[in-house]
Each structure stands twice: as C-alpha cells, then as structure tokens.
Image (cartoon, rainbow, N blue to C red):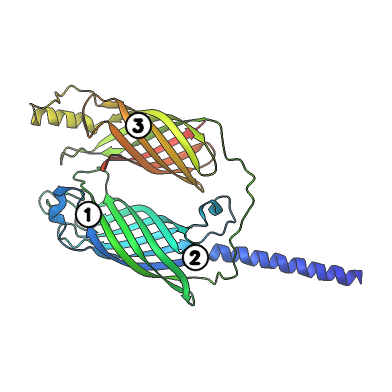
C-alpha cells in the first residue's frame, strides 16, 4: 500500500512539474502581431513648414509584441507590459518630404483591465527625399537621409474576439528629427488616428499573471555618477559644417524604490559647432551682440528623474546654464533618453538634448555609478 501511495505522489509531482514547465515554455512563446493603418495631419509647430503641409499623411505600422507574465523581477510592477519591435511606413503627402520608413523598439503598457494600451517606441527612420541645396532646397524638415524617430500610440484594444484575432483603435503621434546632426532640421510631427487588428500567435488562455511577493528593498544611499557623452552636430546655418562635441557630467542620485531615482548634478559642454556659429554671427550680423571672441564652452546644473524598467531606464533632466558666455537658444535645456545597465556600476546612454522644442544634439554616453 505504501508503494502504491508513493507511486501516486510521484506521478502527481511529475505531472505538476511537467505542467509548470509547459506553462513556462508557453509564456516565452506568448506573443502577438498587429498591423495598424493610420491617417492624420502634420502639426504646424513652426510657421516655416507651412509649405510642407499639403495633405493628410497616411501609412501603416506592423508590430511584434512579446508578452510578460511576471516571471521576472520587473514586469509585475508595470502591470505586465509587452515589449517588441515595430516597422512603419508613412507617405507624408508632400512632394518635398517624400516617404519615410522606420524601425523601432517599443513597450506596450496596459490600463483599465488591459483594455487601454499605451505604446512608446524609439528608433531610426529613413526618408526618401531629404534636403538638397539644388534638387530639394524646400525640404527644411529633414537635413539628412537617416534620422531618429519616436512614436506613441494610445489604443482601445481587445484580443481574441474571433479565435485569436482582435481589434484595436485610437490615436498615434509620430516624430521625425535628426537632432541637428545636419542642418536643416525643422522636424515633422504627425498626429493621426489609427485602426488595426491583432493576432495571438499562441493560445494563452491557460496562462496566469504571476503575483510574486516583493521582499527586496530597492532604496539605496546616495551614489555618484560620472558620464562622458559625445556626438556630432551642426548649427542652424545650413552648410556651416558638422563638428564633434563632448560633455563631462557628474551627478548624485538617490534611488527611492523599485521604479524611481532623483538626480542633482553639473556638467561642462564642449560644443565645437558654437565656435563656427560665433564666428558666423559676428561677421554676418556685426550690429548684434555677438562679437566673435566669446567662449564656446558652457557649464550647466540640472535636476533629473530616472524611471527603471528591467535593465533599461528612462531619464528626464532639466538644466540651467550657470556659465553662459554667448546666447544660443536660451539658458534652460532639457535632456531625455534611455540608459542600459550592463551591471550595477557601468551603463550606456542614448539621450536627446534640446532647448524647449528645439533639438541641439543626440548624445551617446558611457558612465559609471560609484
């Protein structure tokens, strides 16, 4: 009798282990694809682009989305988001702007019992008809063939309405800019309405979202961060040339919990394009305040916030130039972007620095957190 009981218990354990293994395997395979058609309008954020707004842009976005179920140390804190890749095509309905194709990495975040989806994607775009001083001098939006692109999508989404097929609809916002890597760079923003279908690649009806007890205390003492950022950019004067820049940053951060940290720091900007800009302004506009002997360096102080998502984090910083020898786009600046942690100390960063809506540079950085 004892042997029979032991055999039954053993079979039950094997069955539970197989079921657990099967569910974990299915969770890794749980993914969706969706395709959305959109149409909208180019926003007039600058009166100089009026001649580029001649129709209603339209296109489509195709996406692959990997689901999460909480079998990690981050997804349950964000209501089990998806992550994936997107490809978009957009006809800007203007002979000077042409057509854009872009590739993104994205996250989908869910609200209202997972019926409301918010997506944010960041990637690289290619335009078919960039600025050219002879062939396409009217395209002041895209000064280079390749540029960065960001898009956000807010959709009402229902899955599995007919077998594994569902629908979604809502609003999208698409932004293209090369961040002054090359002038001109007025950029284009599209506000659109989208409608689409989604398809589950696997049957996920047997899967449950995991609720794991959190025992880790994520709060940390104040840490010192040292960052070196670099890149190339050009002033707004078309043809003035591309120049390298580098930035040395030092800031203290205080991690408050699983999601957030606050920052306070200072940095020095070595922006070589300003040398040429100062020379150009002093010669072209001799009656203005730029004399030609001003220092091209700037020193800023800033406060910031860091939002942690898996090994990635999103940073937002607002700064003020304490040392500001020449007036260029104003004394306040904004930095937004992403960090990727290789381990607890070392990280890489990709950020955009701007003055209000006017981008100055895309920054590539590497740093250490001590």
Residue named by callout 2: 31
- Residue 215's place in the image compared with 84, above or below, is above
The residue positioned farthest toward the right in the image shown: 1
Query: Badge 1 local density, few (<14 within 10 Å), some, or many (20+)?
Result: few
| Residue 53 coordinates in the image, percent (x, y) | 16, 57
Is label 1 in a helix, a strand or a loop?
loop
- Residue 196's place in the image compared with 302, above or below, is below
CB atoms at circles 3 and 2 under 8 Å apart? no
- Residue 282's place in the image compared with 91, above or below, is above
Quadrant of the image containing the N terminus: bottom right
Asked if one can make out residue 139 in the rendered structure from this viewpoint, the answer is no
Spatial distance from mark 2 to mark 1, Cα to Cα?
A: 34 Å
In front of the other: 359 or 47? 47
Q: Residue 265 carries which label?
A: none
Q: Which of marks 3 and 2 is nearer the N terminus?
A: 2
| Residue 209 coordinates in the image, percent (x, y) | 58, 61
What residue is at 89 percent from the left and 70 percent from the top?
3
| Residue 42 coordinates in the image, percent (x, y) | 22, 57
Asked if one can make out residue 96 in the rendered structure from this viewpoint, the answer is yes
Residue named by callout 3: 247
Spatial distance from mark 3 to mark 2, Cα to Cα?
A: 40 Å
| Residue 217 coordinates in the image, percent (x, y) | 61, 40
Q: Which of marks 3 and 1 is nearer the N terminus?
A: 1
Spatial distance from mark 3 to mark 1, Cα to Cα?
A: 33 Å
Is label 3 in a helix, a strand or a loop?
strand
Is label 2 in a helix, a strand or a loop?
strand
Q: Which mark is residue 43?
A: 1
């Amino acid at each position: 009798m004892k042997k029979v009981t032991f055999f039954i218990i053993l079979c039950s354990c094997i069955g539970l282990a197989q079921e657990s293994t099967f569910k974990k395997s299915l969770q890794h395979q749980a993914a969706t694809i969706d395709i959305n058609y959109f149409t909208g309008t180019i926003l007039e954020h600058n009166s100089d682009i009026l001649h580029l707004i001649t129709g209603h842009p339209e296109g489509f976005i195709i996406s692959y989305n990997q689901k999460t179920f909480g079998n990690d140390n981050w997804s349950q804190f964000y209501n089990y988001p998806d992550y994936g890749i997107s490809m978009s095509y957009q006809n800007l309905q203007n002979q000077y702007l042409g057509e854009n194709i872009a590739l993104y990495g994205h996250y989908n975040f869910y609200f209202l019992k997972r019926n409301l989806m918010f997506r944010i994607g960041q990637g690289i775009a290619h335009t078919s008809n960039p600025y050219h001083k002879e062939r396409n001098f009217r395209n002041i939006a895209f000064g280079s063939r390749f540029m960065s692109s960001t898009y956000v999508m807010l959709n009402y989404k229902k899955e599995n309405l007919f077998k594994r097929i569902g629908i979604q609809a809502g609003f999208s916002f698409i932004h293209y800019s090369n961040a002054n890597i090359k002038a001109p760079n007025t950029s284009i923003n599209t506000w659109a309405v989208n409608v689409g279908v989604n398809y589950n690649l696997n049957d996920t009806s047997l899967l449950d979202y995991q609720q794991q007890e959190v025992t880790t205390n994520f709060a940390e003492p104040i840490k010192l961060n040292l960052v070196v950022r670099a890149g190339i950019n050009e002033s707004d004067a078309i043809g003035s040339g591309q120049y390298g820049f580098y930035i040395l940053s030092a800031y203290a951060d205080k991690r408050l919990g699983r999601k957030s940290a606050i920052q306070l720091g200072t940095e020095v900007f070595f922006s070589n394009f300003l040398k040429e800009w100062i020379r150009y302004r002093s010669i072209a506009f001799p009656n203005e305040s730029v004399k030609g002997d001003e220092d091209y360096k700037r020193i800023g102080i800033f406060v910031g916030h860091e939002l942690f998502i898996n090994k990635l984090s999103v940073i937002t910083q607002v700064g003020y130039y304490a040392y500001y020898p020449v007036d260029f786009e104003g004394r306040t600046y904004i930095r937004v972007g992403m960090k990727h942690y290789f381990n607890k100390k070392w990280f890489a960063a990709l950020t955009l620095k701007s003055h209000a809506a006017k981008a100055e540079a895309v920054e590539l950085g590497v740093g250490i957190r001590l």
